[in-house]
Image (cartoon, grey):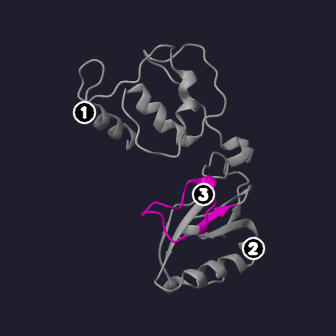
Amino acid sequence: MAWTGQQRVERVVEYGGYISIQPRAGYAAEVTESLRRCPTVGENVNVFLKEDVPEAFHYRAHRLILEIVVIAKEGYMIRPPQTAYSVPESVGSYEGNHGFDNTNGRNPDMRAVLYAVGPYFAQGVRAGVVEQVDVYNLLCRSLHLQCHANNGTLAHVEPFFRPGVPLETGTSFRHGVPLGALMFAVSALLFL
């Protein structure tokens, strides 16, 4: 890539299906336009200012999202800046990447499989599409916790549960394990 905007960019996070860029103060528009016009890059990615990211992505309101979001188009991936490869590069033999747009039926290969097993889940249920934003509701419901406001929909995961399982609230898990200990264990597993 011919663009040498290092002094205009503070930080680049992620790679693969998307990256986030934090430009130096006052350079957001310049960096965005440079990426959009860059030969062999601009036509293979969508570049958004944070506030312009499509609502369907649920990826623009959080304080940790950087000012510019670059999303690779289908068939392309974005390499980390320390590699000697072009940005973006055709995925070709790089199978198994994730982070590509799967909203509204796009890129069906980006779908995941959700298995729900436990004392509150119905057996043999095959549900329709469950969005990633619905998983929080599934976890809260299965742990008998009241969900905070979120972008998911409880009705999308309700078919997974046995009929008659009440939605309870409380601070401990069914078998007396303190909820804090359970959440610590789940968090530890996620970071392994």
Residue 1: x and y in percent read 66, 78
Q: Is residue 153 above or below residue 76?
A: above
Q: Residue at x 41, y 19 (%)?
A: 166
**In the image, which disc is placed on residue 181?**
1
Q: Residue at x 61, y 17 (%)?
A: 125
Which secondary structure lies at badge 3?
A: loop
Q: Kindly check if marks 2 and 3 are in contact, taking CB atoms under 8 A apart as contact.
A: no
Residue to which mark 3 is pinned: 16
Quick one: 157 or 29, which is closer to the camera?
Answer: 157
Q: Which residue is label 2 attached to?
A: 40
Q: Quadrant of residue 31?
A: bottom right
Amino acid type of the residue tagged 1 in the rendering: Ala
Is 122 magenta? The answer is no
- On whether residue 70 falls in the magenta region, the answer is yes
Instruction: Give the percent coordinates (x, y) of residue 107.
Output: 73, 47
Indicate the secondary structure of the residue bearing disc 1. helix
